Amino acid sequence: GQQLNQSPQSMFIQEGEDVSMNCTSSSIFNTWLWYKQDPGEGPVLLIALYKAGELTSNGRLTAQFGITRKDSFLNISASIPSDVGIYFCAGQLIEYGNKLVFGAGTILRVKS
Amino acid sequence: EAGVAQSPRYKIIEKRQSVAFWCNPISGHATLYWYQQILGQGPKLLIQFQNNGVVDDSQLPKDRFSAERLKGVDSTLKIQPAKLEDSAVYLCASSPSSGSGELFFGEGSRLTVL
């Protein structure tokens, strides 16, 4: 149904490495968004995607809206220690009044 | 620009007690949301307001949770009586327009029910 499957659940990478995470669903979404949450803080929007196939960058972050409209991925290039946190994908289903549904998150830990 | 303000940051109560959380959204944002975030999970929408009207409260456990936004600005979320499974972070978010997924979140109110 509306569930978003986010993977991996967690990752532990070396500083300087590139990172990839993705989000899939059996439902079709009209919007995909990626948020980051630091410990003790609320999520902060990183990238918003509005069209199938759209590829958008924000500094070292790149995200894509899948062609099927059922998936999205986020890449982080040349990771640094401050990239540590939880990354959430979120999608909007127009059939549910654009309600925003969040994935369970990917925990990113970076070894310096 | 001031962000979304929430209080209290932390609250510890016994089960069956009541608790209230307050949120002041970003000035001019008509849409306000309350989300529940259980440890290890993504935020789950409890209620969405557009100005002072409720847009979506389909996932709000109405037997114990209530929320209001009387003057279309700040909002309170109340839990009465609390259960152990209500332990979570309660996040308030606001958006300049209804239907946008671009939300601005507060720092959250962490509730522990003993």
Image (cartoon, rainbow, N blue to C red):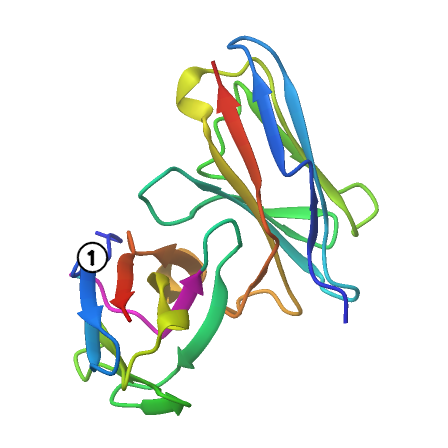
Residue A73 quadrant: bottom left
Say if B87 sits above or below B14 in the image. Answer: below
In the displayed orientation, state which residue is furthest to the right: B71
Q: Is residue B61 left or right of residue A4?
A: right
Please tell me which residue lies in front, A8 or B98: A8
Can residue A70 be seen here?
no
Q: Is residue B48 above or below residue B30?
A: above
Residue drawn at point x = 49 percent, y = 33 percent: B60
Q: Determine the residue positioned at 36% across, 38% down.
A: B39
**What range is drawn magenta here?**
A26-37
Q: Nearer the viewer, residue B108 or A101?
A: B108
Q: Position of residue B57 (x, y in %)?
A: 52, 40
Residue A6 spot, x, y in % from top left: 21, 60
Up-down: is B60 above or below B105?
Answer: above
Q: Chain of mark 1?
A: A
**Membership of B80 in magenta stretch:** no
User: Residue under circle 1?
Assistant: A10
**Image coords of residue A65 (percent x, y):** 27, 81
* Mark 1 Cα shell of 10 Å, populated few (<14), some (14-19), many (≥20): some
* Residue A31 covered by magenta stretch: yes
A100 or A95, nearer to the observer: A100
Answer with left or right where residue B93 lies relative to residue B2.
Answer: left
Q: What's the residue at 50%, 24% (across, down)?
A: B112
